[in-house]
Image: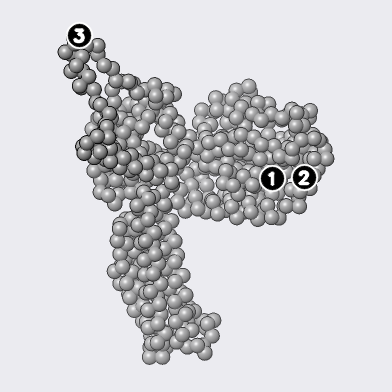
C-alpha cells in the first residue's frame, strides 16, 4: 500500500486549486476544434438538456443534504444501548410490581418478599438480555433491531424467576397469576420500547446521524486507495466520508464517486472546529517528516486520529487496531469526554451551574450594585477567549477595572497594586468573585464548571505569547474551558511572569484532560470552595 505525505501549510484552498488552461491554437481549424472540446453549458431546449438539468438538480439536492448532515453530531450508540438497558431493567421491575397489584390488590406493594423477587427478576432479565446480545451496537445499527432475542431472553429469565419462587418454599399455584401477568407485562414493555427505538433509529439513519464523519488526510494514491475501501463498505457500517484533504500543489486526484478533495489542512481544521468531522485518517505511515506536525495540529482539537497500517501488520497486531468500515485502523489518539463521559460531564455542568445561580442570586445582585456605586461603567466585562476546538467564545466576568482602561485582549495581565483595578474590583479578584457570571457561560454551553481556564487572546508569559511559549499549548482546547481547574487548585494561577509558570499550567490542564473522572471534578470543586481560588497570587 502506498502512502501520502501531505504538508501542513497555511495556504488557502483557493490558492491550491489550479485553473484549467486552454492552449493558444496555431490555426483557425485548431481553434474550431478547441471550441468544440470545451464543455458547453446546458440549455433549456430539448429533452436531453432537460434531463441533464433534472439530474444536476437532484445531485445538488443530495449534496446539500449531505453537507447539512455533516453539521449534526452523530448519535452515540453506546449511550442508546445504555439507555435501552436501563429502560429494560426499570420496565421489568415496574411490570413485576404492577402485576402484583393486579393479581393481589389486597397485598401491600411494599411486601418485602415480592419486591425482592421483582428485583431478582429484573437483574436476571438484564443479564439474560445481555448474554443474548440484545444490546450489541451492531444490532442497534441494523434496520431490523430484532424481536426474537428479547423474547427468548425474557422467557429464560421468567423461568429462572419461577424456579426461584419454588426454591423459596412458596407455592407456584398461589403465585401463578402474578407470574403470568408479570411475564406478559415484562414482555410488552421492552418490546414497546424497541418498537419506538426502531422508528427513531430509522429517522436517525436517514438523517445520517448513525455514522461517524470521517476525513482522509492525503489525496494521493494512498488516500485514493483508502477512499475506495471505505466507500466499498457495507451500507450498515458506521462511517460517512466527508472527503479528502491535502496541502500539496500540483495535480491531485479529483476524488471518487462524489467524494472530492475538499481543501487543504487549514480547511480540515476549520471543518473540525465547525463540528463536521469526528475522525481523521492519515494516509501516511508513522515516522515520515510531517507526522509530528500533523499530530501536533490535530491533537489541538476534539477528534479521533488514526492511520491505516500495512495489511500484514494489521493482521499480526493484537491491540491498538480498530475495524472501521471494514478497514483496520491504528488509533493514535481519541477525543476526550466521549459517549457516557461526555454525558456525565454535561449533566454535571448544567445541573450544578443552575443550582449555583439560584443559590447565589442575591449575592450576584449585591455585587452588581457595588460595582455600579464604585465606578461608572457596565457591571459585566465581556472578553473574547478561546474555547473548545479553538473556537472564540465570549466570557463573562464582573468588571473589576475602570471602564476607560479595560483591556479586552488581555495584553497586560493584572499585577499587584494595579492602578487599573477598582476598590471593589480588588476584593472581587482576590476572592475570585469576579468569575461568578461565568456560570451563565456554563448554562449557555460555552464553558464547564471544571476545566482548563480560558485565557485572553494576547496573554503573554515573560513577554512571549502563551501559544509560542508552550509547544503543546493548544492541546488544552480539546475540551470546554472551566471556571476552575486542576492547575488553579494547585497554585498555578494569577500573573505569569515566566514561561515556566504557563508551562506548569498547561501540564496540569493536560493531566486533567487525560485523567478526567467525576470524582476528580468533585475534588476540584470542593478544594475551590474551601480556598482553592483565593490566595496571594489572586490580584
Residue 199, located in which quarter of the rendered image?
A: bottom left
- Mark 1 vs 3, N-terminal side: 3
Q: Which mark is residue 514?
A: none
What is the x, y in percent for residue 98?
Answer: 47, 80
- The image quadrant that residue 125 belongs to is bottom left
Query: Is residue 510 at all visible to an observer of this figure?
Result: no
Distance in Å between CA atoms under marks 3 and 2 = 82 Å
**Dot 1 and dot 3 residues touching (CB under 8 Å):** no
CB atoms at circles 1 and 2 under 8 Å apart?
yes
Find disc 1 in the rendering and name its residue: 436
Q: Quadrant of the C terminus?
A: top right
Q: Secondary structure at mark 2?
A: helix
Which residue is disc 2 drawn over?
367
**SS at circle 3:** loop
In front: label 3 or label 2: 3
Disc 1 from disc 3: Cα separation? 75 Å
Horizontal side of 432 relative to 523 (left or right) equals right
The residue lying at 16 percent from left, 13 percent from top is: 29
Residue furthest out toward the right: 373
Q: Earlier in the sequence, mark 1 or mark 2?
A: 2
Q: Earlier in the sequence, mark 3 or mark 2?
A: 3
Q: Residue at x 26, y 31 (%)?
A: 42
Q: Secondary structure at mark 1?
A: loop
Residue 147 placed where, x, y %? Answer: 31, 68
Q: Which residue is mark 3?
A: 26
Residues at discs 3 and 2 in contact (Cβ within 8 Å): no
Question: Residue 481's spot in the image, x, y percent?
Answer: 57, 41
Mark 1 or mark 3: which is in front?
3
The answer to whether 402 appears left or right of 104 in the picture is right
Front residue of 439/82: it is 439
Q: State the quadrant of the N terminus.
A: top left
Residue placed at 34% from the left, 36% from the top?
243
Amino acid at each position: 500500500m502506498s502512502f501520502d505525505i501531505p504538508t501542513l501549510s497555511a495556504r488557502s484552498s483557493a490558492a491550491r486549486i489550479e485553473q484549467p488552461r486552454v492552449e493558444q491554437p496555431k490555426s483557425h481549424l485548431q481553434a474550431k476544434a478547441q471550441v468544440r472540446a470545451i464543455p458547453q453549458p446546458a440549455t433549456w431546449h430539448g429533452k436531453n438538456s432537460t434531463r441533464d438539468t433534472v439530474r444536476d438538480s437532484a445531485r445538488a439536492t443530495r449534496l446539500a443534504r449531505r453537507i447539512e448532515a455533516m453539521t449534526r453530531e452523530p448519535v452515540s450508540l453506546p449511550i442508546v444501548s445504555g439507555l435501552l438497558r436501563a429502560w429494560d431493567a426499570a420496565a421489568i421491575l415496574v411490570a413485576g410490581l404492577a402485576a402484583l397489584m393486579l393479581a393481589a390488590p389486597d397485598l401491600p406493594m411494599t411486601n418485602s418478599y415480592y419486591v425482592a423477587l421483582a428485583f431478582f427478576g429484573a437483574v436476571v432479565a438484564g443479564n439474560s438480555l445481555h448474554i443474548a446480545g440484545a444490546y450489541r451496537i451492531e444490532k442497534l445499527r441494523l434496520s431490523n433491531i430484532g424481536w426474537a432475542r428479547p423474547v427468548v431472553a425474557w422467557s429464560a429469565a421468567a423461568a429462572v424467576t419461577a424456579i426461584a419462587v419454588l426454591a423459596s418454599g412458596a407455592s407456584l399455584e398461589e403465585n401463578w397469576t402474578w407470574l403470568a401477568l408479570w411475564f406478559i407485562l415484562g414482555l410488552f414493555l421492552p418490546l414497546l420500547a424497541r418498537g419506538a427505538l426502531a422508528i427513531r433509529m430509522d429517522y436517525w439513519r436517514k438523517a445520517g446521524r448513525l455514522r461517524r464523519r470521517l476525513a482522509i488526510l492525503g489525496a494521493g494514491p494512498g488516500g485514493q486507495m483508502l477512499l475506495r475501501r471505505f466507500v466499498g463498505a457495507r451500507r450498515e457500517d458506521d462511517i460517512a466520508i466527508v472527503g479528502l484533504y491535502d496541502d500539496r500543489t500540483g495535480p491531485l486526484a479529483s476524488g471518487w464517486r462524489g467524494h472530492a478533495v475538499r481543501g487543504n489542512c487549514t480547511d480540515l481544521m476549520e471543518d473540525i472546529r465547525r463540528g463536521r468531522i469526528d475522525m481523521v485518517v492519515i494516509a501516511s505511515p508513522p515516522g515520515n517528516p510531517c507526522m509530528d506536525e500533523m499530530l501536533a495540529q490535530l491533537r489541538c482539537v476534539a477528534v479521533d486520529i488514526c492511520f491505516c497500517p500495512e495489511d500484514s501488520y494489521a493482521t499480526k497486531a493484537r491491540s491498538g487496531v480498530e475495524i472501521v468500515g471494514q478497514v483496520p485502523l491504528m488509533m493514535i489518539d481519541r477525543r476526550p469526554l466521549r459517549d457516557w463521559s461526555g454525558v456525565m460531564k454535561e449533566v454535571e455542568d448544567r445541573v450544578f451551574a443552575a443550582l449555583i445561580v439560584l443559590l447565589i442570586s442575591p449575592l450576584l445582585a449585591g455585587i452588581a450594585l457595588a460595582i455600579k456605586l464604585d465606578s461608572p461603567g457596565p457591571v459585566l466585562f465581556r472578553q473574547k477567549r478561546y474555547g473548545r476546538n479553538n473556537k472564540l467564545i465570549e466570557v463573562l466576568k464582573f468588571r473589576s477595572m475602570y471602564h476607560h482602561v479595560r483591556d479586552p485582549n488581555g495584553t497586560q495581565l493584572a499585577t499587584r497594586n494595579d492602578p487599573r483595578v477598582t476598590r471593589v474590583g480588588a476584593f472581587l479578584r482576590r476572592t475570585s468573585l469576579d468569575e461568578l457570571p461565568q456560570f451563565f457561560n456554563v448554562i449557555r454551553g460555552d464553558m464547564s464548571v471544571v476545566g482548563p481556564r480560558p485565557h485572553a487572546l494576547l496573554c503573554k508569559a515573560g513577554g512571549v505569547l502563551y501559544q509560542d511559549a508552550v509547544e503543546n499549548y493548544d492541546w488544552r482546547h480539546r475540551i470546554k474551558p472551566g471556571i476552575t481547574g486542576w492547575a488553579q487548585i494547585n497554585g498555578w494561577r494569577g500573573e505569569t511572569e515566566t514561561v515556566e509558570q504557563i508551562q506548569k499550567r498547561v501540564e496540569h490542564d493536560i493531566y486533567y484532560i487525560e485523567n478526567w473522572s467525576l470524582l476528580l471534578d468533585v475534588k476540584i470543586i470542593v478544594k475551590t470552595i474551601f480556598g482553592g481560588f483565593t490566595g496571594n497570587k489572586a490580584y
